[in-house]
């Protein structure tokens, strides 16, 4: 049998990809999975994960993803290190290019689980404090800042939602907004501005974070580039980015429908795309929830859909 031909090609290796691999493997579909640049997905940058069912004591993100990966390997998933750099979805079977033409894989069905990358400010200290005070998911990590001071960067609906969520947990929430207004909807603006725990820092930008062993504060610049520019520090324990995500779909080169933010569009309540036999799972098709458990669930659905598609095609 050709080792580069498969009934199911899974692209991506976060909770959605690995779960899809587990289900596809248990269905004897012998899937090939290409892990991509970040095996394990965004959870590999998270310290403690306490909200994934079945782990009452919690565990680190890398530990959890290693466990799910080992489960996929247990059922003989062909997991490969590499990157899908191109794919032809114009006809079945589909052909994916690996590592800029190093080799190709021919697949009867494809599950795209490449996730979405959080946007960061590009500060050196963001990387330094990743998992030690810096986060791009308040729902994931907010619990660890109960009764503490945190900051949220951004001025859109997502930033407002994150700030409001954190206000129910933290002692105080700073919203760092580089403009003199919020871009969020009027309803969200009113909720933020009327919440006594949230202080909006208008026309502020983050220069750097500081702290010993973790985030303890942020250096900010006010009215950057203007005559009255000044520098201030705030004391915080957590720094949350809420300036958006970029779905990892560039390798598709526009072959699948996306929404206005670039997320893959699927049929309501399913992982099916408009291309027969091509499915999307996890954050690459989810601009709303972006949780490990919802990604895993969608990976399960994608594998089941692929199995049913193949059953009806054969």
Image (spheres, grey):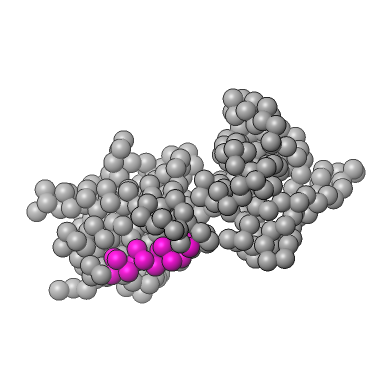
Residue 199 or 207: which is nearer the viewer?
A: 199
Provide the major secondary structure of the magenta segment.
helix
Q: Is residue 255 visible?
A: no
Horizontal and vertical percent position of residue 57: 44, 58
Determine the residue positioned at 64% across, 26% down. Answer: 190
Drawn side of residue 182 relative to residue 117, left or right: right
Q: Quadrant of the C terminus?
A: bottom left
The part of the image, by quadrant, that contains residue 24 is bottom left
Horizontal and vertical percent position of residue 291: 44, 48
Classify 108 as above or below 75.
Answer: above
Residue 281 or 289: which is nearer the viewer?
A: 289
- Farthest residue to the left: give it: 314
37 in the magenta segment: no
Magenta segment boundaries in residue numbering:
60-73
- Farthest residue to the front: give it: 57
Classify 155 as above or below 27.
Answer: above
Horizontal and vertical percent position of residue 253: 41, 53
Classify 73 as above or below 59.
Answer: below
The part of the image, by quadrant, that contains residue 98 is bottom left
Image label count: 0
Q: Quadrant of the N terminus?
A: bottom left
Residue 153 or 165: which is nearer the viewer?
A: 165
Drawn side of residue 109 relative to residue 114, left or right: left
Horizontal and vertical percent position of residue 155: 65, 38
Determine the residue positioned at 59% across, 38% down. Answer: 168
Q: Is residue 262 visible?
A: yes
């Amino acid at each position: 049998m050709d080792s580069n031909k498969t009934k199911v090609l899974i692209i991506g290796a976060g909770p959605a990809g690995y779960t899809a691999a587990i289900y596809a493997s248990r269905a004897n579909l012998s899937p090939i999975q290409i892990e991509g640049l970040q095996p394990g997905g965004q959870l590999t940058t998270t310290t403690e994960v306490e909200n994934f069912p079945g782990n009452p004591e919690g565990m680190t993100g890398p530990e959890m993803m290693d466990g799910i990966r080992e489960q996929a390997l247990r059922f003989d998933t062909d997991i490969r290190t590499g990157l899908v750099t191109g794919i032809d979805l114009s006809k079945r079977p589909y052909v994916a290019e690996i590592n800029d033409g190093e080799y190709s894989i021919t697949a009867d069905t494809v599950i795209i689980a490449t996730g979405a990358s959080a946007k960061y400010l590009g500060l050196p200290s963001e990387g330094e404090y990743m998992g030690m005070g810096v986060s791009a998911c308040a729902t994931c990590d907010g619990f660890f800042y109960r009764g503490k001071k945190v900051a949220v960067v951004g001025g859109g609906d997502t930033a407002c939602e994150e700030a409001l969520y954190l206000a129910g947990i933290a002692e105080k929430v700073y919203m760092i907004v580089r403009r003199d207004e919020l871009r969020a909807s009027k309803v969200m603006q009113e909720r933020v501005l009327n919440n006594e725990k949230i202080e909006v820092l208008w026309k502020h930008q983050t220069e750097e974070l500081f702290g010993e062993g973790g985030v303890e504060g942020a250096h900010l610049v006010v009215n950057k580039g203007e005559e009255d520019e000044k520098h201030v520090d705030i004391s915080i324990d957590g720094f949350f980015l809420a300036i958006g995500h970029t779905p990892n779909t560039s390798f598709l080169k526009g072959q699948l429908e996306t929404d206005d933010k670039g997320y893959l569009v699927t049929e309501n309540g399913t992982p099916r795309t408009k291309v027969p036999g091509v499915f999307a799972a996890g954050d690459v098709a989810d601009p709303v929830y972006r949780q490990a458990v919802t990604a895993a669930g969608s990976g399960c659905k994608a594998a089941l859909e692929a199995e049913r598609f193949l059953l009806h095609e054969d």
